[in-house]
Image (cartoon, rainbow, N blue to C red):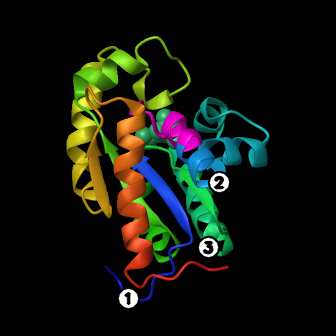
Amino acid sequence: MASNRLISNLSLTGFMGVGKSTLGRFLANSLRYEFVDTDELIERKAGKTITEIFASEGEEHFRKLEHELVNEMANWNRMVISTGGGLVTKNNNLDILKTYSFVACLWASPETIYHRVKRQQHRPLLQTENPVERICQLLEQRARFYKQSDYIVNTDNRPLRVVAQLISKQFHEAVNKGNQQRP
Ligand code: S3P
């Protein structure tokens, strides 16, 4: 683990539909941290939905907004941060997140992901004719980034409570290993 880290937050990363927001809210509650979701923060700031941002300004612009937010969050404390599925794959965002948070990645199989997202329409990248193929392609491209997280946990067939306990344990260990939390 990098020595210049100050772990004062917990970030959750992983593909769309793996359950980052649900788990993030649960973890925030048990840690008594505040919960934030990068997609929600970007939508609030832009006054538009993610779908509208992609449609009007394009994906590159959305990635720029994500990167700005990752830099802005550097002074935040006691937050559980749920990150959009592509955030850690761009612009050195993962390294920046690691300077101020412990990064846990939620993993799931393409089948589980498809099952969870198939009735949802708010993710522009999955509005294609063959979403399963798209999920597999993107997962393959992104796996190398997700794998650089501090901890990776498979969520397939695991109850939320168990996944939360596994992440909490790793988070506390990382904090106690000399990575101080800011007051
Ligand atoms: C994206 C994931 C979405 C959102 C945007 C792009 C991605 O967030 O940021 O649609 O590139 O994987 P969730 O992972 O919360 O669905």
Q: Nearer the viewer, mark 3 or mark 1?
A: 1
Quickly name the residue at label 1: 3
Compare residues 125 and 158 and report the one nearer the observer.
158
| Dot 3 crowding, Cα within 10 Å, few <14, some 14–19, many 20+ | some
Asked whether the viewer can see residue 90, the reply is no
Sooner in the amino-acid sequence: mark 2 or mark 3: 2
Quickly name the residue at label 2: 32
| Dot 1 crowding, Cα within 10 Å, few <14, some 14–19, many 20+ | few
Vertical placement of residue 68 versus 135, above or below: below
User: Horizontal placement of 149 versus 83: left or right?
Assistant: left
Res. 144 image quadrant: bottom left
Amino acid type of disc 2?
Arg
- Residue appearing at x 58%, y 54% in the figure: 31
Mark 2 lies on a secondary structure that is loop
- Residue appearing at x 34%, y 44% in the figure: 106
Magenta span includes 18: yes
Mark 1 lies on a secondary structure that is loop
Residue numbers of the magenta segment? 17-26
Q: Indicate which disc residue 154 carries.
A: none
User: Horizontal placement of 119 versus 56: left or right?
Assistant: left
Quickly name the residue at label 3: 74
Q: In 3D space, how far apart are the residues under numbered discs 1 and 2 (Cα atoms)?
A: 26 Å
Expressed as whole percent of the image width and height from the top left, the position of residue 100 reads 53, 73
Magenta span includes 110: no
Expressed as whole percent of the image width and height from the top left, the position of residue 56 reads 65, 36
User: Horizontal placement of 2 versus 139: left or right?
Assistant: right
Vertical placement of residue 179 versus 61, above or below: below
Q: Nearer the viewer, mark 2 or mark 3?
A: 2
Expressed as whole percent of the image width and height from the top left, the position of residue 183 reads 67, 79
Main secondary-structure element of the magenta-colored stretch: helix
**Number of marks in the rendered image:** 3
